[in-house]
Amino acid sequence: MIGRSKKETPAPAPAPEVTPAGKGRPTPTRKEAQARNQRPLVPTDRKVAKAEQRKRRNELYAKQQEAMRTGDERYLPLRDKGPVRRWVRDYVDARFSPSEYFLPLAMASIILLFFASVVPEVAVIGMVVMYVAFAIALAFAIGITLIIKRKLRARFDESEIPRFTGIYAFSRLFQPRFLRAPKPQVKRGERRD
């Protein structure tokens, strides 16, 4: 048939995909399911299990100690985690605090008390110095703690601030800088307000 156009035959419609009914595998019996989920209460080889547990504990402890040096948030103890606690640490560590010198002064005063029977005047001077240093350190720490709490409320939501953050700041103020844990991540005078 010359001159006639061929009718194009439409392409056959794709067959609908047949999905198998169910999950494609037999349901395990109750006995099989219970056997699969059963774990012994006591490991078969206690020495190996104890060694593995000790190894995991030591690895976690090593990571925590490294985090205390570097400030890595992932492995810090729960007490030190979070942006609020980091901000408090940085705020305290960036400032000079007479409170951090109280412990060394108290130790020196206690040593002077050993000589109370030999030189009573020195012991009295040591006690007076210790009480004056304690009063100054306490007043400074309370003042800074109140300032920190006010700045935290301005910077973070009330729900974000963990409980006892003021006590956290207060205790960090009394620790000498080289004994603080986690280690200070800011230099003295490097303020992050």
Image (cartoon, rainbow, N blue to C red):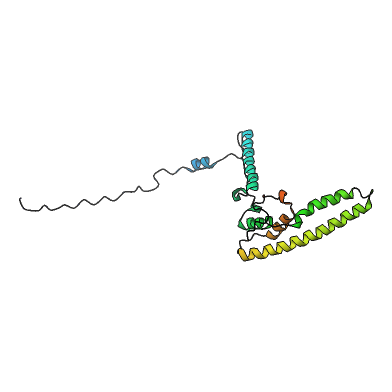
5 sits left or right of 64 in the view: left
Quadrant assignment, res 60:
top right
Residue at the image position 72 percent from the left and 51 percent from the top: 177
127 sits left or right of 50 in the view: right
Residue 142: x %, y % from top left: 74, 62
Residue 70, above or below 136 = above
Instruction: Tell which of 68 and 14 is nearer to you.
Output: 68
* Quadrant for the C terminus in the image: bottom right
Instruction: Tell which of 114 and 37 is nearer to you.
Output: 114
Residue at the image position 91 percent from the left and 52 percent from the top: 122
Residue 59, above or below 112 = above
50 sits left or right of 116 in the view: left
Instruction: Tell which of 64 and 50 is nearer to you.
Output: 64
Residue 49: x %, y % from top left: 62, 36
Quadrant assignment, res 66:
top right
Residue sitting at the far front: 189
Residue at the image position 65 percent from the left and 46 percent from the top: 69
Quadrant assignment, res 154:
bottom right
Residue sitting at the far left: 2
Residue 163: x %, y % from top left: 67, 60
